Amino acid sequence: MGYSDELPPVPRPAPEALAAALAALAGRFGNRCAASQAMRDQHAQSTSWLPRQPPDAVVFPENAADVQDIVRICAERRVPVIAYGTGTSLEGQVNAPAGGVCIDMRDMNRILAVHAEDLDCVIEPGVTRKTLNETLRDQGLFFPIDPGADASIGGMAATRASGTNAVRYGTMRDNVLALKVVRADGEMVTTSTRAKKSAAGYDLTRLFIGSEGTLGIITELTMRLHGIPESIAAASCSFPSVKDACNAVILTIQAGIPVARIELLDDVMVKAINAYSRQDLPEMPLLLLEFHGSAPEVEQQSRRFGELAHECGGGAFSWTTRPEDRTRLWQARHDAYWAARALRPGTEQVTTDVCVPISRLADCVEETQRDLRENNLVSPIVGHVGDGNFHTVLLCDMNDADEIARAEGYVHRMVERALAMGGTCTGEHGIGQGKQKYLRRELGESAIDTMRMVKRALDPHNILNPGKLFAFH
Amino acid sequence: MGYSDELPPVPRPAPEALAAALAALAGRFGNRCAASQAMRDQHAQSTSWLPRQPPDAVVFPENAADVQDIVRICAERRVPVIAYGTGTSLEGQVNAPAGGVCIDMRDMNRILAVHAEDLDCVIEPGVTRKTLNETLRDQGLFFPIDPGADASIGGMAATRASGTNAVRYGTMRDNVLALKVVRADGEMVTTSTRAKKSAAGYDLTRLFIGSEGTLGIITELTMRLHGIPESIAAASCSFPSVKDACNAVILTIQAGIPVARIELLDDVMVKAINAYSRQDLPEMPLLLLEFHGSAPEVEQQSRRFGELAHECGGGAFSWTTRPEDRTRLWQARHDAYWAARALRPGTEQVTTDVCVPISRLADCVEETQRDLRENNLVSPIVGHVGDGNFHTVLLCDMNDADEIARAEGYVHRMVERALAMGGTCTGEHGIGQGKQKYLRRELGESAIDTMRMVKRALDPHNILNPGKLFAFH
């Protein structure tokens, strides 16, 4: 099902090699190494239509030296290792197509240092973004990247996560200062320092960010932080069409209004929310926004956006800085996931994302909506539209082979459309297993060759998360 | 002299191989291939105390296919190729220690597309930043990275340049969306798309940015642009000490004031400027600032900064949005280079930079000043202090062996100090030839090993700008 039948096969390790590795791990880690079927199943990808492929064992390291030991034990026997944060990736990134050992970072969850004056912190990879933000709050600091799920920061770095705040604060690419990474040979690599910028050699930090665990295992991260804004305003505005909403977004970005979040919900999503949350939002495309700054700044930003929205045909524009009103205004977005599910109970949600130059966003969304209608598919659309990034949340009856076939064709055309518009097959979910053929279409063989050269140089025996991104051979 | 005697030797190509390559290039490129001594000398590094090492020939390609041909002709014969923009790099990046062929991008200077709605443009690598900004101005757009020199954008990408605007707009790392790059085997690689963000595979764009021409030759860049702000305010404020000035910077960054530039000039630099430009600035540390936004935004930002500066002991604070007054206020910064030279006519300027976590900036600058005094050296200090990055502009009598020895010791201690404070040996000038030993000290052998694995994988015969960054063997 899905794209996985097109994936290159990854050979399983020799049974005796695997057994030797598992025995060595059991000896070294005792009950922090688990191989029960339940534990293995828990660590197989489960958030997409890709088949679940459990690892052969799961180990819970407590520190970087543990990770080095796991990697060395496995490397010696050519057994795959797969780093695992919270399992919330969406393209099969933690699946184990060749089996092997899952390294669950659950217990490497310490916040090692917070440098408030420097706006940075040093953490272990298992820290989740909500835990980090709870710890930082008392110091007036926050970590802005919010992909929705309460993902681990290590996993977010490995998949180059972004989400709703990226339009202002950037993605994981922009918010990691330095990493410590265990290489496939077990060596520990420090990629950079706490300095805010550096011109010192290759950008190893960015090389590992987004490499989906295929080049090394992250054991420590130095993260940029931001001061909690003095004032936060939320705003919402409905538009007659997606095109009008997108035009308002384009004008906002061009005017340099430093909007912190700007999210599009299409009319299908708004209807779903009205039904689910008993709201009475106008059943047309909706923009939800957030502004960060001093009180007068957010007032001005909100007012300037309101003027631009009005020029683009936007309806009643409401904004507020009161926390309870902000929550109410954004309730629609927070409810989106459950509201979408409630549209077709019993179906699976298949989420996919693309990202296009913002001038093409309206065309891309509208053609995607038309495609859905023509193929009798149900999929609300939500988008981080300030970046030209949107998701469709396809509700697919997995017992209906014809519907699955139509859904696959739809996802395929959506990606092709984004590529034809100068965009990318994924703005934030990554390649994993699900989008390998599109990576090749997007960048061409010589880019994949270049990635493969890097992969083979750093992991010559393909033990780090094999079967992801592109074929090793 | 300098550090170059510590550099690993790079073998020159076999004479017959070099002759064959030069003959093939002359046949293919006619008078766009030049080997006169004058032309060769012009293309050797000349902005530092590193010895000039000219290439054997200079070729002027007109398009990407020309670059592919040059690389293929040279690769076949194992002859080095060195990409060249404007020759304004500061650490010997365009020197040719093993000879070879310089690829001067002078004629690849077309602006291929400006996408105003998407805030991006597509350009060839020889376009300089001033030319780009002149072209963009009519469309209300600008490209923010300003390293001082009117460098080529290709060279700026290759060295991960930044400069005065980086505190707000980031460095070249953050402002390149995609590259086209000719690999060592002559293949053309497309690294990404025009989408504002992507999670599609390894971050090849960032891998090439800052690789100093050692992994590939950039032939096209897709750049992020920004709207010219509605209003620009300049401000200046003197402080009793570097520590007070740095405290004001820290508070400004923590408060999230989106300052566009924040530059520190130390008292030595201010004295030099008073002497050179007949100004009467208070002879104490000076902060110069620029704010970008709507008229009320820049007024608020300026006022908020003024309050913080006052808290930190800052003196009279002046700000203005009138262009002629802004120019006057920033005159000190614009004159800094010539004012520094005038301090000791007949000496060479040796510029070096480091970058530290901002909480350590005052300590680092003050210890550096003390070191200068103790060693009877003259070096004004200027800094992009919002990033924790500063330069010393050492004025060194190159006929005085003792002074040269003291200067080398001073630069060495300055870098060691920055590293001990958790910083980097270079915030923006890069490694080139001049800082190779510090790259190793900063990140350790396993990081250099990792870089070397990548280098050998992409350029197995070490023909791309050999002798830079780290030893190939």
Image (spheres, coloured by chain):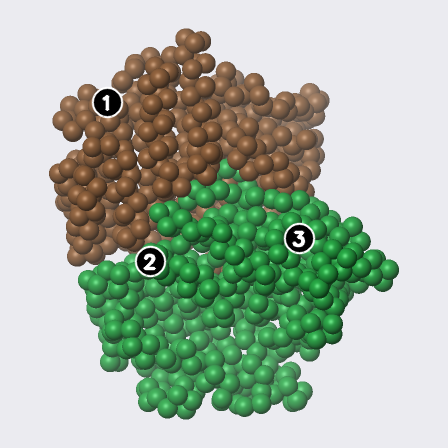
Chain colours: A green, B brown
The chain containing the residue under callout 2 comes to A
Q: Residue A229 location in percent, x, y?
A: 30, 60
Which residue is disc 1 drawn over? B272
Q: Quick check: do tags 2 and 1 share a chain?
A: no
Q: Nearer the viewer, residue B50 or A81?
A: A81
Q: Residues within 10 Å of mark 2 (few under 14, many from 20)?
A: some
Mark 2 or mark 1, which is nearer to you?
2
Which residue is disc 2 drawn over? A140
Q: Nearer the viewer, residue A438 or B336?
A: B336
Q: Is residue B445 above or below residue B111?
A: above
Q: Residues within 10 Å of mark 3 (few under 14, many from 20)?
A: some
Q: Residue A258 location in percent, x, y?
A: 31, 60
Mark 3 residue type: Asp
Residue located 36% across and 69% down the image:
A262
Label 2 element class: loop
Q: How many marks?
A: 3
On the rendered structure, is B66 left or right of A381? right
Q: Residue A352 location in percent, x, y?
A: 54, 73
Q: Residue B80 location in percent, x, y?
A: 62, 30
Q: Is residue A444 above or below residue B384?
A: below
Mark 2 residue type: Gly
- Quadrant for residue A445, please give it: bottom right
Instruction: Measure how far apart labels 2 and 3 are at the Cα level.
Output: 34 Å
Q: Is residue A276 above or below residue A350?
A: below
Which residue is disc 3 drawn over? A66
For the question of whether residue B119 can be seen, the reply is no
Mark 1 residue type: Ala
Q: Residues within 10 Å of mark 1 (few under 14, many from 20)?
A: many
The chain containing the residue under callout 3 comes to A
Instruction: Measure how far apart labels 3 and 1 are at the Cα level.
Output: 56 Å
